[in-house]
Image (tube, grey):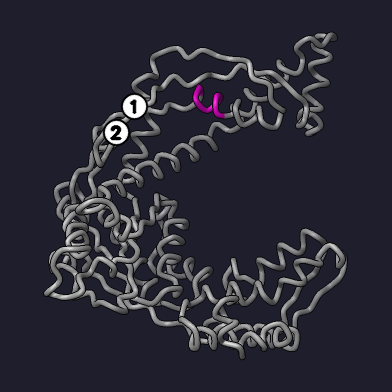
Amino acid sequence: MSLVGLTPREIVQELSRYIVGQEEAKRAVAIALRNRLRRAALPEEVRRDIRPGNILMIGPTGVGKTEIARRLAQITESPFLKVEATKYTEVGYVGRDVESMIRDLVEVAISLVREREARRVEQEATRFVEDRLVDALAAGVEGGEEARAKLRERLRAGELEEAWVEIPVRESMAPQISVFSESGMDQLGIDLSQLFSGFPLPRKLKRMTVRQAREVLREEALERLLNMEEVRAEGLRLAEEAGIVFIDELDKLALGGPEERGGPGVSRQGVQRDLLPLLEGTTVRTRHGTVRTDAILFIAAGAFSQAKPSDLMPELQGRLPIRVELHPLTQQHFQRILVEPEDALTKQYQALLATEGVRLSFTPGAVEELARIAAELNRTLEDIGARRLIPVVERVMEDISFEADRHAGEEIVIDREYVLEKLSHLARDLDLSRYIL
């Protein structure tokens, strides 16, 4: 795990590169991850009795709950899955099979491992693809090795990307089988691709450009170079030891009151009950093998504006022992969000317009005005947190983005007056702002 060497303080510093404020939540997830590392260093007889401290984040929309969990997974290269709790209440009595989130997490983990291994064998795969493309391009061309050498040079220089070639492509023989159960093939532990992997697949010549053929041949090269059994086994281990599942909208599962009977309340309570063993630690069968959920970190989140955490089942509350509250964002937060994070909106627009030769800059007054208007709209319309900045900045940038090709080589400065010119009438007209912003 890349978490090795990262202290909680360093994890918070990394998160702060992208997320403004919410220090309490950052500290909670940093400690939870560090405890996971400490647990991994313990002897087996001690480790099996230690469970991760699952977290419940409480706060309005747009304050950074999802972003904290997502960035946490990125900096630690952990398998990450976000699910909406409400989707498990939409079908049938207790909704979709809740264990499907673990099966989805395993697929994410296997993809991560495969990408990592693909980088390790990248040079060999590139040579394989190049040789096959040269073979296809040289078919029917006279000149022997000298002609092949010239084709290889042109191929490496990118001159033949749109040339047409014919390459043999394997056809899929996996049959279409329907399983009439809620869980389908996954819970039965069946992987048709493995079941039919022993059968030789016929090949068919397919005509495509060199650019398209690269992707097809690269996949074939990876199939030859990678041991998928080892990749799957490592993916299962990674999901078990480093997986992070973010369960959003948990507050929607809370019952409306003690008198609620039947209807959607029954389904919501059923989903809560199904979540209990996952958070406590159980075994889930997937098509790649079984997975224990004991060490998977679950981060649940919800606004809890209409319900309280205490409206959840007591058993579920007990499996989310760490609770942190994320605070609404103010105008000062918006000002920092516009310029400080590495993926700040102002930096994104500067990078986008730079591709067309436009040098874009925002004055401090413009940033302050953007933040003020976004905060005012959140107060008067609906508080959607930092997401309000996206339509506000987009509205200001609309004309510049549309006419960017005419300003190549120029410098454009957005100041307070320009922001007011574009947004003041919308900020005043609440009915119009409701639809546009």
Identify whether 294 is placed above or below 151: below
Image coords of residue 242 (percent x, y): 34, 50
Query: Can residue 87 be seen by looking at this rendering?
Result: yes
Q: Give the secondary structure at mark 1.
A: loop
Image coords of residue 88 (percent x, y): 28, 55
Label 2 vs label 1: CA separation?
Answer: 9 Å
Q: In this rendered view, identify the residue nearer to me: 42 or 424.
A: 424
Q: Are marks 2 and 1 in contact (CB under 8 Å)?
A: yes
Identify whether 83 is placed above or below 238: below
The chief SS type of the magenta part is helix
Residue found 64% across the figure and 75% down from its top: 393
10 Å crowding of disc 2: few (<14), some (14-19), many (20+): some
Which residue bears the numbered disc 2? 185
Residue found 17% across the figure and 57% down from its top: 270
Label disc, if present, on residue 177 of the rendered structure: 1
Q: Residue furthest bottom?
A: 428
Query: Can residue 50 be seen by looking at this rendering?
Result: no
Query: Which residues lie in the magenta part?
Result: 219-224
Residue found 29% across the figure and 33% down from its top: 185
Tell whether 209 sits left or right of 392.
right
Image coords of residue 248 (percent x, y): 35, 63
- Look at label 2 and name its amino acid: Met
Mark 2 or 1: in front is: 1
10 Å crowding of disc 1: few (<14), some (14-19), many (20+): few
Q: In this rendered view, identify the residue nearer to me: 29 or 392.
A: 392
